[in-house]
Image: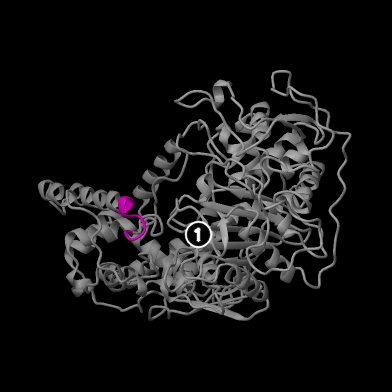
Amino acid sequence: MVALLGLGVLLIAYLRIDLPKALPPVQTTFVYDRNDELLSTFHGAVDRTLIPFTQMPQHLREAILAVEDARFYDHSGVDVRGTIRAAWSDLVARETVQGGSTITQQLVKRVYAGHYTAPGDNGIRDYVVPPRTVKEKVREVLLAIKVERTLSKDKILERYLNTVYFGHGAYGIEAAAQTYFGVQGRRLTILQSATLAGILTAPEAYDPVDHPFDAKFRRDFALDRMVQHGYLEAERAERLKRKPCCAIPIDLQRGPDAQIEAPGDAEYFVQYVRETLARRYEPAAVFGGGLQVRTTLDLGYQEAAEQAIESHLPSPQDPGAALVAIEPATGHILAMAGGKDFGKSQLNLATFKGGTGRQAGSAFKAFTLAEAMEQGFDLDSSWYGPNTITIDDPMCAGPEGPWEPENAEGGGSSYSLQSATAHSVNTVFAQLVVELGPESVADMAHRLGIRSDLPAVCAITLGSVAVNPVEMTNAYATLAARGMRRRANPLLQVRSPGGRIDPRIVPKGRRVVDENVADLVTYALEDVVEFGTGASAGLSSWPAAGKTGTAQDNVDAWFCGYTVQIATCVWVGFPKGQIPLENIQGVSEVFGGTIPAAIWHEFMETAMEGKKAVAFPEPTFDEQTVTPSAEAPIPPPPAPSPEPSPSPSEEPSPSPSPTPPPPSPSPPSPTLPPEPSPSTASPAAPVSSRADDRGG
């Protein structure tokens, strides 16, 4: 009786579902700043052009079927056998390795699911949030069956190929053919068809423009599947697989990145928003779903960021720069300067998409210090900082022998951990990482907000690892928020055309370190800005904390810092990398405490205008009891006070441009020697690494 009742309910639901008579219109997605000013719009890279089934090459249809739904012409919309097989594969692998949706079900999700009527849906179901409940999934299955009984198989496949997303903002086979190969859909070759079939599983990951190696792997997989299902001879497939991938006559200026327009120089932020949306939602929703996207960007801050960079690096021959500002209390990205001219280069220097990031130099010492505070070390603990030190510990050794980090010149003084941080003394932090363990430092960096892979090598304490400005700012924002991490987020609200708001947008904060640990780190980093290597970053009316950083051979320079209200990181370097920063705007050698600190200072002075001067919380010191181990080389007794005399690793910090100096104590003398910077020549702990870092 219950079974009959259930079947009756399903029958009624089935009969009440109506199919739309035409494909849904492509609707523009609008992107706004936090004050509801229009930033940009998103749409497909090529207008969707519908082509009839007869103009779709047979080998294209066969390639798609072989990869996506080999039993398409045998099932009735729901492939029970395929679903069971996919579920079993996922169970064995303990992860999702095989999809179970048929082409009809995919079409339903992409095209019809947002347009069928049902009780309680007010006529339209928004597809921003994908179906999750059993009720929604049952509706999806019923609709797939209805589609199969209403349309012919060829018509279903035609509609699927006219709407499916292929990456780079192109959806539909005609748009994909023109975007990737510059040809009409009816002229696609077998090799091109296999390439497009391989893209469908994950368009962003297998895009042949940005990921040609992965695209070739998927193309060859599609050819193998065509052989398996009798669409292609094995010998011919092997010949095709020997051909390179991917000779694509694509005009990238027609791509979605180049189409991005935004007020001022906010294109890089808009690009980042688009990438974030593409990870969250169906591409059809992002590029043609009519979303209303309210972002975290403050155009006033964005203008201040661009102006600060332009005032210190005005020449086209100057290196590039990136600036990211985050609100610690929320994780909101307030400003993102990712380059000088988006029209010439779409590489976002704030994210280094597709690259490996850049060495952070001594800006990474903040994370080592955080781990030391968590393990109970005292900021007043005494450390001997020679010019060069030999670390015999096996975990730090490289292929050429022991690790030998060094300062640039001088040495032989004793430092408290606090003063070693202020003056960025490499040889002290080299000893500290041995005490802590590089794995612990890497874990702390990850907890604070670094998302890049971090090898657990001793040189991590000197910033030998590659990171990007967004994650560095996120990590420093966690310190500013007293140990509460909130993932960097460019979105405030995403609303569908039907008015449905995605509730998942607001990230939840997570405590990753104790408040007092973060307060102790901030307390030490305040000295960096007040009289240490970052003195030129000091603000006129607001307490600030920060850290300088410079990579090996001065190829990258950083300043990361924060007030209670805003955390900001500045990176300066040549986009191509490995070019020393020398003779830039009157600065003979660029370190973290020179141009990056000056850019940070100018931006923050503007961004903080009108905000209260809020002091950082005073830390509790009596909880710190750990002292360096007996094995640590700390020969002489501590000097009375290392601060009055120049540190052997201090950096000159005069501003390279006419930025007014802050009223804080005068910065160190410009004649002070630089600090050594890490080398990453070896994947293990580098030998004789130099942290060439007058700014960190």
Q: Quadrant of residue 524?
A: top right
Q: Magenta includes 212?
A: yes
For residue 682, say whether it is visible. Answer: yes
* Label 1 neighbour load within 10 Å: few <14, some 14-19, many 20+: few
Q: Is residue 15 visible?
A: no
Q: Quadrant of the N terminus?
A: bottom right
The answer to whether residue 354 is left or right of residue 634 is: left
Near-viewer residue (184 or 345): 345
Residue pictured at 19% horizontal, 58% vertical: 191
Q: Is residue 349 magenta?
A: no
Q: Give percent across and percent down for residue 241.
A: 18, 49
Apparent side of residue 379 relative to residue 534 in the rendered image (left or right): right
Q: Residue at x 45, y 37 (%)?
A: 681
Depth order, front residue of 148/438: 438
Return the x and y of residue 9 as percentages of the image width and height: 52, 63
Which x, y percent locates residue 41? 50, 78
For label 1, the residue is 279
Q: Nearer the viewer, residue 502 or 509?
A: 509
Residue at the spot 78% in from the left edge and 31% down from the top edge: 376
Q: Amino acid at mark 1?
A: Arg
Which residues are drawn in magenta? 208-215
Colour pattern of the rendering: one colour
Up the image or down, 139 lies above or below 581; here it is: below
Looking at the image, residue 73 sits to the left or right of residue 593; the answer is left
Question: Which residue is farthest front?
Answer: 671
Question: How far from the left and from the top, in percent, is residue 130?
Answer: 52, 62
Tell me the quarter of the picture where residue 645 sits.
top right
- Give the structural element (helix, strand or loop) at label 1: helix
- In the rendered picture of this protein, how many numbered marks are placed on residues? 1
